Image (tube, rainbow, N blue to C red):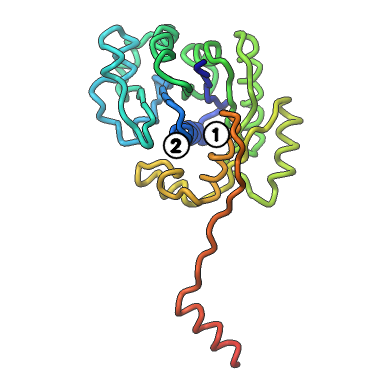
Amino acid sequence: MVKVYTIASGKGGTGKTTVSVNLGTMLSQLGKETFLMDADIGMANVGLVLGLQDAPVTLHEILAGKGALNDAIYNGPAGLKIIPSGLSLQGFQQADPFRIQDVMSEIVNRCEFLLIDAPAGISKDGVVPLAVADEVILVVNPELPSIVDALKTKILTEVVGGHVLGTVVNRVDQDKAGVITKKMEKSLGVKVIGIIPEDANVRRAASAKTPIVIKYPASPASLAFKRIASGLIGAAYKEESAPVRKEGFIERFSKALFKRK
């Protein structure tokens, strides 16, 4: 049985696309046939993040009835299949977001997991992904505006008949993870299924147009994505830690010099 998850957030800038791309890549690494569809047809970012900004056929063409779905599916990292949205305003104007369910009906026979990167905020094109998914995962930052907007998205999801699985809290100070988890669960009324720590390697990987789980697999954020993906597939997660960096010659020499003084 295929599982469809919509990755949503109340506001932009929470790192929703980063979570979608890395979670999808990790599911593929764990041996699951996974598709990622960028349903943010107005402000598409998946293609930009993965270097597919020049893709000739995108979800825009499919939703406008001007292309075949097979032509809009691209190979991503670790075997992840990508369906990007286009970047043109003309393509956005011609795309019919209500045809997303038709696209889904074609995809679900080909995969085990379908992740839908939904538009931020509350809009007509953002309602459909919330309604058609098996479960919605909210991406939120530990800041009041993000929490308030995530709560609105949760309420909207329930109004349209959807179900929120839980929330992923992104860009968290690791020392405050426990406190933030309790705060989020109390504020949103849903379980925190993952904490992504603040990690400078996320930006470095983004600059290389590569998911952090591929570029820096032992980094704190990558290990967090593996923990979440393992939970989604019901697999046991073996706790890992980032490797300890060995001291270089200069550092060893400096320590020895100061000890003598």
State whether residue 17 is above or below residue 126: below
Dot 2 alpha-carbon crowd within 10 angstroms: few under 14, some 14 to 19, many 20 or more: some
Q: Position of residue 148 (x, y in %)?
A: 66, 28
Q: Residue at x 31, y 30 (%)?
A: 75
Q: Which mark is residue 29?
A: 2
Residue 3 placement, left or right of 92: right
Q: Residue 111 vs residue 62: left or right?
A: right
Name the kind of residue labelled 2 in the image: Gln
User: How many callouts does the rendering have?
Assistant: 2
Q: CA distance from mark 1 to mark 2?
A: 10 Å
Residue shown at 51% from the left, 65% from the top: 245
Is residue 111 left or right of 221 when viewed as pictured? Answer: left
Q: Residue at x 44, y 44 (%)?
A: 212
Position of 97 with respect to 146 (left or right) is: left
Q: Quadrant of the C terminus?
A: bottom right
Label 1 SS: helix
Q: What label does residue 248 carry, if any? A: none
**Residue 191 x, y percent position in the rendering:** 70, 29
Q: Are marks 1 and 2 in contact (CB under 8 Å)?
A: yes
Of residues 255 and 172, the one nearer the viewer is 255
Provide residue 85's location: percent of width, then percent of height.
Answer: 35, 22
Q: Quadrant of residue 53?
A: top left
Q: Amino acid at mark 1?
A: Ala
Whole-percent x, y for residue 158 in the image = 65, 13
The circle drawn on residue 229 is 1
> Within 10 Å of the Cα at label 1, are there few (<14), some (14-19), or many (20+) other Cα atoms?
many
Task: Locate residue 157: give its quadrant.
Answer: top right
Instruction: Answer with mark 1 or mark 2, whichever residue precedes in sequence.
Output: 2
